[in-house]
Image (cartoon, grey):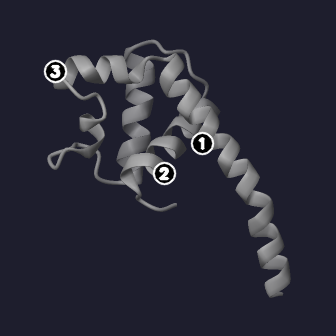
Amino acid sequence: MRIVALLLASLALPAMAADLEAGKRLVEEKRCEACHHEKTMGDAKAIYLRKDRKVSTLAKLKSQVALCNSELNLQMFPDEEEQVVSYLNETYYKFGK
């Protein structure tokens, strides 16, 4: 049984890595950090790391990405939103799954 679980986990790793790379690419393509730079008047990544951040759970991160997509007309599909969420969570937030 453990072997099956390990096998399934090892199969999921390449898919997760692909999602993270796709999410990173989307953040760059959609110029998310350019918008964040305007809001923070400096380091764009500070918006993810500040102590008083609005995003405090994975659900709120998903909502925020969806809001940005809608409000800024970024035209991302739901799976692309999920890729961005995965990338941001893995890189900055660390909320778990």
Asked if 32 appears above or below 15 in the picture, the reply is above
Q: Which residue is mark 3?
A: 41
Residue farthest to the top? 73
* Closer-to-camera residue (92/67): 92
Tags 1 and 2 touching, CB below 8 Å: yes
The residue that label 2 is drawn on is 90
**Residue type at mark 1?**
Leu
**Few, some or many C-alpha atoms within 10 Å of disc 2 (few <14, some 14-19, many ≥20)?**
some
| Residue 27 point in image, percent of width and height | 49, 26
The crowding category of the residue bearing disc 3, from other C-alpha atoms within 10 Å (few below 14, some 14 to 19, many at least 20), is few
Residue that badge 1 annotates: 20
What is the x, y in percent for residue 16? 67, 50
Residue 2 shown left or right of residue 60 in the figure: right
Q: Nearer the viewer, residue 96 or 77?
A: 96
Residue at the (75%, 51%) spot, across then down = 14
Q: Give the vertical position of 76 relative to 14 (above or below).
A: above
Residue 69, percent across and down?
Answer: 45, 22
Q: Is residue 13 left or right of residue 59?
A: right
Quadrant for the N terminus in the image:
bottom right
